[in-house]
Amino acid sequence: MKFTVAIDGPAASGKGTISRKLSEYFGFSYLDTGLIYRFIGLKVLSGFDPLEAIEKLNYHEIEVDGLRTEAVSKAASQVASDRQVRDALVEYQRNFSRRCGGAVLDGRDIGTVICPNAEVKLYITASEEIRAARRFQELSIKDKDLTIESLISELRARDLADRERKVSPLLKAEDAVLLDTTELSIDASVALAVNTISKAIRLST
Ligand code: DC
């Protein structure tokens, strides 16, 4: 079966956790496209040319360790505004989305640019305060100097850059289902998404 779930939304909206749980529930493959941009961002911080880094990229070797820092988030967002960088990453993402057995992809332009014909599109969001609080919980264990205030301004600046860039900006696709997780637990959010996807699977078979 080929079935694509396209998930977009702002930074720290919970889309990564929800996407992973959905992929486990339905037995679909999962691609966190933000990790690819983070990996290229990290390479740029170490002095590499982004396009050369993409040429040499082995998608299976992208490690999560060290990719979730504020510096890498910023570098990822900057590198993601480059049209050539984005173009060079389209084919891999599209091929992934049509894998047999179904696929979940999350990012910023999945429903709008990468998979405009996805069977299900979700746009996951939450208030700025909740997103910063969730990210704080995740990162403050390793980074004792981190403050909620610095996280809020980092998220705000990054969302603004991701929304206002010319190429593939963060945007809710017209046909995406909005899932606001501000007042929802992860489990409740996943349950709503499971409902939407199950209905679409029934309709497609
Ligand atoms: O989802 P994330 O926070 O890990 O993504 C890091 C940055 O990468 C984000 O600020 C913008 C960029 N990105 C993008 O432009 N397009 C995607 N499909 C995924 C991420």
Image (tube, rainbow, N blue to C red):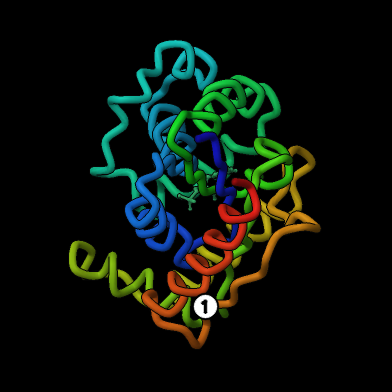
Which residue, given by chain and number where applicable, does mark 1 sit on? 181
Along the line of sight, the residue nearer the viewer: 81 or 194: 194
46 sits to left or right of 152: left
Q: Which of the 4 image quarters holds residue 180? A: bottom right
Q: Is residue 90 above or below residue 31?
A: above
The residue positioned 59% from the left and 46% from the top of the image is 205
Q: Residue furthest front?
A: 205
The residue positioned 37% from the left and 54% from the top of the image is 20
Along the line of sight, the residue nearer the viewer: 32 or 163: 32
Query: Mark 1 packing: few (<14 Cα in 10 Å), some, or many (20+)?
Result: many
Q: Which of the 4 image quarters holds residue 9? A: bottom right
101 sits to left or right of 81: left
Answer yes or no: is residue 150 visible. Answer: no
Where is residue 49? Give x, y as percent: 50, 18
Q: Amino acid at mark 1?
A: Thr
The residue positioned 43% from the left and 56% from the top of the image is 19
Q: Secondary structure at mark 1?
A: loop
Q: Is residue 76 above or below residue 163?
A: above
The residue positioned 37% from the left and 76% from the top of the image is 187
Along the line of sight, the residue nearer the viewer: 124 or 65: 124
